[in-house]
Image (cartoon, rainbow, N blue to C red):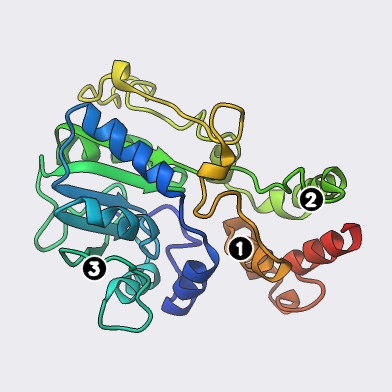
């Protein structure tokens, strides 16, 4: 099946590389938490499947813990970038660890989970299935049904997302900066939000789970009693342990690049092509407002 998400799916290789350079990786402690939850409930470390893998950020980080790693994404541009970044023979490789196995990156949607590939992803073959800041674009009933098939008994699905970007309280004038940021986002970008964007804003509180689906779509293989929800940055867990390097510290150039990878910004730029790269660009205007208030 085709992906219903169009913005990232249509990415070229060049856009995939820009995305990879701008998007930060996640903190080692986040990955450790996922692996600990998986293994303490009997999960094995044979095969990892990372879905909506983009340029391979999570697949590359978790691959050293597994014997086999597969990354799937519907975007040819993202997959080409992931293959490039994971190839130890290229100087663009971001892997700092000598992997014991090559990562298999393939074009596939979250709803297919590789059934059409050659060879396909076999039933009952996956130990850990991850999706990092991606599940809000999935057709969840179809995803859960396929996930139940490819997971081994005792396997784990781990889904996580970033929330709304905010200015850390330690930054001078942080309250005014956050207020201005939210005002501009509401005015300029919310018209370009899709349902998936709202799911990330609410930290997946409303993400459909196997037992909350409509009658007839529920996936009985998943046990509600095994469900674990964790939050970072809301008082439960330290936000410093979500992104690699702690709370994301960035200069204005990096902030501009990171914001430029957001899907509402991409859709804004598709509509206002003549403003891209000028002082009228939505991200440039946000940057100028930050500069004014700092």
What element does badge 1 sit on?
A: helix
Q: Position of residue 83 (x, y in %)?
A: 29, 72
Observer able to see residue 289: yes
Residue identified by numbered label 1: 258
Q: Is residue 78 above or below residue 138?
A: below
| Marks 3 and 2 in Cβ contact (< 8 Å) | no
Query: Looking at the rendering, in which quadrant would you find the C terminus?
Result: bottom right
Q: Earlier in the sequence, mark 2 or mark 1?
A: 2
Residue identified by numbered label 2: 171
Q: Earlier in the sequence, mark 1 or mark 3?
A: 3
Q: CA distance from mark 3 to mark 2?
A: 38 Å
Q: Position of residue 195 (x, y in %)?
A: 55, 42
Q: CA distance from mark 2 to mark 1?
A: 18 Å
Q: Is residue 87 above or below residue 153?
A: below
| Marks 2 and 1 in Cβ contact (< 8 Å) | no
Q: Residues within 10 Å of mark 2 (few under 14, many from 20)?
A: few
Residue identified by numbered label 3: 98
Q: Is residue 285 above or below residue 228?
A: below
Q: Position of residue 12 (x, y in %)?
A: 44, 75
Q: Residues within 10 Å of mark 1 (few under 14, many from 20)?
A: some
Residue occupying the point 9% across, 48% down = 122
């Amino acid at each position: 099946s085709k992906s219903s998400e169009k913005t990232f799916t249509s990415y070229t290789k060049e856009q995939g590389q820009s995305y990879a350079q701008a998007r930060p990786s996640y903190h080692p402690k986040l990955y450790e938490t996922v692996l600990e939850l998986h293994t303490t409930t009997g999960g094995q470390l044979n095969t990892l499947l990372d879905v909506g893998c983009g340029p391979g950020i999570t697949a590359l980080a978790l691959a050293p813990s597994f014997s086999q790693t597969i990354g799937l994404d519907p975007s040819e541009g993202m997959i080409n970038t992931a293959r490039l970044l994971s190839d130890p023979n290229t100087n663009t490789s971001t892997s700092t660890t000598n992997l014991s196995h090559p990562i298999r990156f393939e074009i596939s949607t979250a709803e297919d989970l590789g059934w059409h590939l050659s060879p396909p992803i076999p039933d009952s073959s996956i130990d850990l299935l991850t999706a990092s800041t991606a599940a809000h674009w999935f057709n969840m009933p179809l995803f859960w049904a396929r996930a139940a098939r490819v997971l081994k008994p005792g396997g784990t699905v781990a889904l996580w997302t970033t929330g709304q970007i905010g200015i850390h309280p330690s930054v001078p004038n942080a309250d005014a900066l956050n207020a201005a940021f939210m005002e501009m986002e509401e005015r300029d970008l919310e018209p370009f939000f899709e349902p998936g964007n709202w799911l990330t804003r609410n930290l997946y509180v409303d993400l459909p789970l196997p037992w909350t689906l409509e009658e007839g779509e529920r996936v009985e293989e998943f046990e509600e009693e095994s469900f674990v929800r964790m939050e970072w940055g809301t008082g439960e867990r330290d936000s410093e342990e979500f992104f690699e390097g702690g709370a994301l510290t960035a200069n204005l150039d990096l902030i501009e690049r990171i914001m430029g990878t957001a899907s509402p910004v991409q859709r804004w730029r598709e509509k206002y092509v003549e403003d891209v790269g000028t002082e009228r660009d939505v991200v440039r205007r946000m940057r100028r407002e930050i500069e004014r208030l700092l």
